[in-house]
Amino acid sequence: MEVGKRLSRVDAPDKVTGRAKYTGDLVPRPHLVAKVLHSTIANGRVKAIRTGKAQAIPGVVKIVTCFDVPDIQFPTPGHPWSVEKAHQDVSDRRLLTDRVRFYGDDIAAVVAEDEISAARALGAIEVDYEEYPVVTDPEVSMTAGGESIHAECPDNVLASMDVRTPMPESDFKTVEEVLDCPSYHQFRGHYQTQQVQHCHIESALSYAYMESGRIVVVSSTQIPHIVRRVIGQALGIPWGDVRVIKPYIGGGFGNKQDVLYEPLNAYLSKAVGGRCVKLELTREEVFQCTRSRHAISFDVAAAVDGDGNLMARSVRALSNQGAYASHGHAIVANAVTAFRQLYQDQLGCHAQARTVYTNLPSPGAMRGYGIPQSNFALESMMEDIARAFDLDPYEFRLQNLMPPGYVDPFNGITCHSTALRECMAKGAQFIGWKALREKYQNQTGPVRRGVGMAVFSYKTGVWPISLETAAARMVLNQDGSVQLQLGATEIGQGGDTVFTQMAAESIGFPADRVHIVSTQDTDTAPFDTGAYASRQTYVTGMAIKDTGALFKSKLLDYAAELLERGAGELDVRNGEIVDAGTGQELLKLHDLAQEAFYSFRHSVHIAAECTHQCKDNTFAFGCCFAEVEVDIPLGRVTVLRVVNVHDSGRLINPQLAEAQVHGGMSMGLGYALSEEMKFDEKGRLLNGNLLDYKLPTAMDHPELTALFVESDDPTGPFGNKALGEPPAIPVAPAVRNAILQATGVAVNTLPLSPQRLVEEFTKAGLIGGKEG
Amino acid sequence: MNVEILNCIVNGRSVEVAIDPRESLADTLRERLGLTSVKKGCEVGECGACTVLVDGQAIDSCIYLSLWAQGKKILTVEGLQDDNGELSNIQKAFVEEAAVQCGFCTPGIIMSAVEIVGSGKSYTREELRKLISGHLCRCTGYQNILNAVERAVNEAHKFVGK
């Protein structure tokens, strides 16, 4: 069995020796350097750009402005394309724009011989603007009635949804009637999350050049096949004229599930006759000009009966989309859908969501795709309800959880397997839940402790909201090993290693006989939409399983020919051909391969390729328990212990699964306690660097514990379900709920930074009041 | 453009290279000497991805002028394997503890680990956290990185005092 092993990462030796090549390590010499001129206003219009002085700077090769680029609007999100117009992504970007929509919008670009000339040229370009009032608050943006941010969207509301679950027979006709009924406990809450960034340590960068009349773009991306399509759309050229290559990437976390500057890079290379042009963003540009996590506000209501049953809930979410649609409404739609799914309402749930343009940098996909936001609201709400009506927060959750076999009434996503209850029990036992809850009641004094929890559900991949398709190719080598080619991408999560294990498992090879091709080149890699939605182990896994079975059957057919036996009597075990009945080795794969390649009698190049279109989905689950110490006068929170327990189905590689959970927990801790993109009233980002942004260091972390309860999912190719994104989801509400237990103060806005906590503790009278 | 000649020892080999006096050591190592393990994540000394050893001391090479390295010994990850190509104990610890994910911060942290292990001292977990806090990593939560560094430190101490 290769699946389930703690196999060392297949890419680790290259990564610890510095041999692993990332985009910036591969740029051919000589090359030109491109830099982008960003607007210094957040809302308005470029009236004129004067490039004469910049053009005269030695080393400057070409300057293009928003008035030069083709008038083509294109979409940027890393979604599969839809052939139905109604389901296509919003096309609201141009390569460069004269209509400035956020501070830092792209209005011109310089191509120069070197970085210094390019930077000097940027400084010498003169721009005249017409300025409009800056709107950063979505509530204001919807109602202000000023100049629309996009002409196609006059009220600045990109999209909205309004979903009511079917209600059973009862005295109530609507959820709102239940939420007004005095015979139930009634709860109302407002929760607000902040805009944060992925902070992959490698910048966003690419380089582009022309070869054989086509444009080649090498990019640090999670989605090479999608980047190819969008470059084609943005430049108005056939998609086949574009070739995208993805080497190792230094982290993505969803930011690189968006097409960032690749189309502009391709355009600039073409503009200088196909010479190689590198476009690498500075860290400050990554913060200001690439994607981030949406700030979303939630107004929630719930009715609970005397026995602790959730009777009905409503949620109204408002998502700040910033200047461009990117993934747009899909994020908040996902957020409120998960809000609805995790718990069962006896009577019904009413979910509304709205996505609104403002003059801020555009959020897009980020690990968890809206669920960290709605889970903060939902799990804070569950805690607050339990506290208000004297319910045990653990039992209250348990009692109302999504049941096994649950089917979503709208999208049909089904709970095929769940070990959430076992995860909760394991987490509670690890942290010592009951004893600590007891111990930390009724504390006094300036330093107090508390323990909190949160649970979550997360779907696996995007079916049926969007297409799920993946392909794999396996090719026999002369020595009896196999090379594995995928369109799915390694982005640091360990994809290449688990794909290797899956291929080995499905063929009957040991893992060291599978050689994965890590780089995706859209000219040669099979089609796959890429790394997002925690989909690859599930969807690409299915393609690998199918391809492995086909590859194995071809090996057996050829072996049957050589051995003059029926193929059905044979099997591949531990990399050799054996008698299926007795297990006796009959033929070395090496000998089979030599014969297949070089036989005068019958030479055949054994290879297999399959597409798997996945038309199912399944829920992964998990929980977080956190123990904190709060220094009330300082507003400082120390996380003493934290544990995540996950049901991601069968683990393909437990060691890498743990590592993945650590990283997600870390991101969750930053989300909970320190991270926030801060803007001034002009829409300027104030902390667009890794220091002021307060990305957590090793000193800001407690020991991280990752535990699992493995269900065996009947739909997963190897019993597996989503794992990549979920670990980031439950940490912030667990920490928030622990602070609530410690201090009695419910803080409903992230992050729980010292400034915010001091304000809240002061309001509550813990600082400066009779207790302070 | 002014050109100056930098003479130094890089990964045990004497190097003479023409540089721009304004140039950072990170750029010299990457662009002129092809040592691409030296990663640039911020170029202002925040992330630690460009860490190399200069005369045994870990520095952010993105904010270290190449001229300052005149006559000094520089070590990068490319210089850690022995003559037979065997990984160093620190590199092995990073592989075995699954301390590597995207791998972009890895060479820099390994170089700090070389300094830590080379000090010959033992450290508490909290001290190790402080010692690697100049490195930012978004993939690992530092958990397995700490495990790897701790393991390398402990292994080094097996040979001490016996």
Image (cartoon, coloured by chain):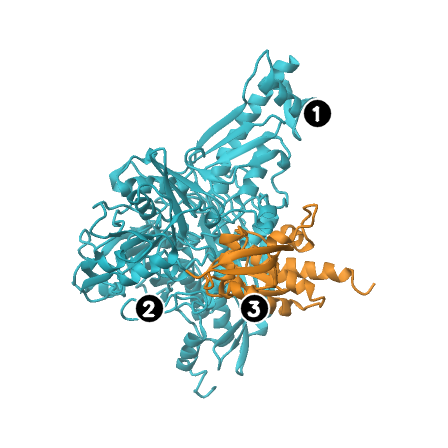
Residue closest to the eye, B119 or B7:
B7
**Quick check: B127 left or right of A43?**
right
User: Left or right: A651 with respect to A189?
Assistant: right
Residue placed most toward the observer, A589 or A88 = A589
- Disc 3 on helix, strand or loop? helix
Which residue is located at x 35 percent, y 50 percent? A260
Q: How many C-alpha atoms fall within 10 Å of the one at disc 1: few (<14), some, or many (≥20)?
A: few
Answer yes or no: do the residues labelled 2 and 3 have beta carbons within 8 Å? no
Which label sits on residue A583? 1
Viewer-side label of 1, 2: 2
Instruction: Residue A79: tell me if it is visible.
Output: yes
Return the x and y of residue A694 as percentages of the image width and height. Answer: 46, 68
Q: Residue A206 in the image: x percent, y percent?
A: 40, 48
Amino acid under label 3? Met
Q: Which chain is cyan?
A: A
A90 sits to left or right of B38 = left
Query: With respect to residue A178, does A261 lie above or below?
Result: above
Quickly name the residue at label 2: A679
- Identify the amino acid type marked 1: Gly
